[in-house]
Image (cartoon, helix red, strand yellow):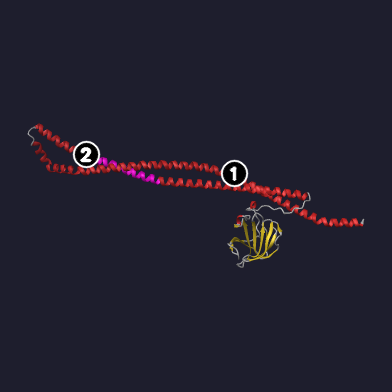
Amino acid sequence: MAACAVALISTTGIFAPLASAGQADRSQTEALAKRAAERIQALQREADRLATEERTLLGDLRRLEIARQIKAEQLKQVQTEKADVVTELKTTTTRMQQLEAQESQMRPELNARLVEMYKLGQARYARLLLSAPDLRQMGQAARMVAALAKLDRERVLSHERTMRELKSTHETLEKRNKQLATLETETARAQAAADRAVQARNDLVADIDRRRDLNAQLVGELQSAQLRLQTTLRELSAGVAVVAAPTLPVAPFRGDLPWPAAGSGIRKTTRAAVNRASPTSGIEITVADGTSVASVHEGVVAYADAFSGFGNLVIVDHGARTFSLYGDLQETTVKKGDRVERGQPVGVSGYTPQGAAGVYFELRIDGQSVDPLQWLRKR
């Protein structure tokens, strides 16, 4: 009986840590599943907002398209009228030039006749009439002189009247041409503005489509992760040992990653390290010396030691070629190979190369540095 009790105690001692570890794995997996579900809901709300925004933009785009068509038609009408006015101006100018040429040709004849008539005077008119041999010829001479004078007067008056009318028409056409030129410029400017507005709306719609596609892709990744987590939970419930710890992809959490440290100041910076082909870009967060620095996402510690240009450095591998870097640490609290969760401390802050208290943070995706501010939560 005593032996059985000892055996029972021994067995209980063996399985208690295993049960505790399994419970921890289950709690961890359930927490990840909950976080995935919450993020899916957030992405779905964003998808609904994007759909509503796109519908509004499409309505605006239709109205802008109509406005642009109206502006284009107005510009076409103005250009047509302007072309007609220019043609009329050319015709009027040509007619004025022809009349001026005719005037130049007949001016010597009129001047000569006027001079001769002036020389005749009243007495000479009388002698001209009295020199006629009879009354019939005298009447003919009088009529001839009167007809010539009248013809000359009519020609002069007709020419002056025509020239006045042409000049008036020319001035009116020039004024209208200037008005149409101004209107053409304004209409063309309005059409260009309408074109830019339409293009801007098209760009926004294209951007929303891209974001909706990305949103759907991220939701798909999270749903796949959810399925894996559910499988893990079933295995844990069945007592099956889980070889690989469950993780969530980083990409769906763009703009929702927690800050590695609560700092008062942020400065973008570039770091160049020994034996590195090109410098990398990250941010320096101003924090008090000794502030706890935490991982922004779950993963496995790939590096935890001193590194030239970064002081004490921790690199966390989040899978899918995604890494987060935590530099300028006074000390590290993890070692290579450790599994870390989101929000778990990886070290404490120290001093930047400039001598200010702070921590360096960098995010690398597919081997390239990305702007961390686009991935961290907005403050």
122 vs 240, left or right, is left
Q: Quadrant of residue 100?
A: top left
Q: Residue furthest top?
A: 136
Residue at 62% of width from left, 58% of height from top? Answer: 363
Badge 2 amino acid: Arg
Q: How many marks?
A: 2
Residue at 10% of width from left, 33% of height from top? Answer: 137
| Quadrant the N terminus occupies | bottom right
Q: Position of residue 232 (x, y in %)?
A: 74, 50
Q: Please name which of the two marks, 1 or 2, marks the residue nearer to the observer.
A: 1
Q: Is residue 52 above or below residue 305?
A: above
- Pointer 2 residue: 155
Q: Quadrant of residue 151?
A: top left
Badge 1 amino acid: Thr
- Whether 177 is among the magenta residues is yes
- Pointer 1 residue: 52
